[in-house]
Image: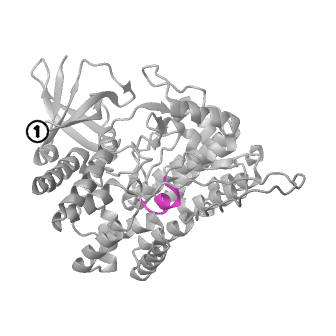
Amino acid sequence: MLIKRLQGQLEKRNGYYYEFDMHSKPLGEGGMGVVYKGFKIYEATGNRSVVAIKAMFDGLPAEVYERAEREASIRLRNDNLVEMLGFISEIEIDPYGMQKNKYYVVSEYLNGVVLSDLLTGQFKDKDGIEIPYAKQLYTDYVSEKEKTSIEIIRCVLSGILALHDKGYIHRDIDPTNIMVTDEGTIKLIDFGIAKYVRSLGTIDKSLTSTGKFIGKAEFASPELVLGDVRNQGYPTDIYAIGILFYQLLVGKLPFTGSKYEVLQMQLNDKVPVKHIKNPLLAKIVKKATEKNKSDRYSSVAELRVEIDKAADSHPTIISRYWKHGVATLLSSVACATIIYMLTLPEPPGPTPKPQPGPTPKPTPVVVDYSKDFNQALAKLNSKDKNIATEGLNLMKGLADKNCADAIEELGLTYCTFSKVQSSEIKARREILGLNQNISETQSIQYLESIKADETMSVDALYILGYSYWKQHNWEKGVETLSKALEKISTSSESTFNGLPKEDLIEDIKRYLNLCRKELN
């Protein structure tokens, strides 16, 4: 055992460090380095959480280390993106007394199988343990390829939109960079050649060097093949998503051969969408993979709308795996789980003879507000005050109809004192110009009106429990904070809107103990 401790300036300021056993079995090894299972440890409490640490190889070109640092700087929390945690550089002394630079990339720890392996029938992790979610996904893919392909693409779109919202393009979307995890999620796991759109120049030297192409030729858009960074943008990722969608629907790639041959096909040949059975989906792939980027979908949201239309028109396409729906796609703000269920009527049969008996109770009508909620949320997160105000009013209308998702969203919007408030909600409040005193009262009123506590997020329970403590309502405080503690303890999330899970647990416990102390 040889424990390596890592702590940069950021980690030192915030009172934590990373460590891993350099003699342990690696999680994996790639062209840039070896990945180990490690831990993030808080110095004050000793609390630790599992992370993945990539120890980069020595002697790589400087541009490779620059790409790694850029990858690590993309700090986003999204169910369909791996969370990057840090980049640490150190000067180490080798056995001969020579100094050398060492680089480490820290990210969220994931266990699962990459999509490229899943498509070949592999659904076991690196230790040979079967992943039930992956197995079920593969079984469904074999039996219902069209439906399952759509669900996988929806997850990819969710992650990519979160990147695009922050001004990044991915530029390396392919099945080897998508993981199906043992926690039942589908995540993009590599941002190695992601680029901030505003920093794009005329020639991308990190992608092309003396004719060498960095990336996956089979998924590269024409502008990526040419290294023409000036013409790269969000449609560049849409092209790769179109190729991936084709691969999922057809079962093979549209272009194969040597790397040079494939790159030439990407420049000159149209994707053979005639092999896609569903004409609506074929049309979508065709537009997504147009050679001229101006002919493609202009945004991920536009692409998603077209996929939803195709899914709605096909009665066999039923959402099962997509967790966050259109709202996650149109905004990086996390929203409630959406499940679309379509049923077919039974064929008519002989009219049964009336039988005496009690009058059956009417079946309660369940109203699906998901589409209205998504539209309201998209407007609420607009940077235009008038549109955001319209979204707020729409959300209030849904709350009046007892839509729990809308009620919670309003409660979070009006909250001013929460440590777990997201940057998106803070920006929303600023655009709307919400008054603090009024906001706090309204936040509590909305959150209190949610009848089913099991539907409330950790954020909402924490806010409500804190407010009860603030109001000296100790009994309700104990009840609500206990539910928050129970929910966060079973959550797989490591952070909540930037706040480490361990820190939030400590906060919840603090106010819970204060309430209990007053009751006793």
Q: Position of residue 144 (x, y in %)?
A: 69, 40
Above/below status of 153 relative to 477: above
Q: Position of residue 88 (x, y in %)?
A: 21, 39
Q: Residue at x 55, y 66 (%)?
A: 369
Q: Position of residue 271 (x, y in %)?
A: 69, 47
The span shown in magenta is 324-332
312 sits to left or right of 212: right
390 sits to left or right of 120: left
Q: Residue at x 31, y 61 (%)?
A: 422
In the image, what residue type sits under mark 1? Answer: Glu
The residue wearing badge 1 is 43
Quarter of the image for residue 256 reads top right
Q: Secondary structure at mark 1?
A: loop
Whether 357 is among the magenta residues is: no
> Looking at the image, which is closer to me, 41 or 3?
41
Whether 327 is among the magenta residues is: yes
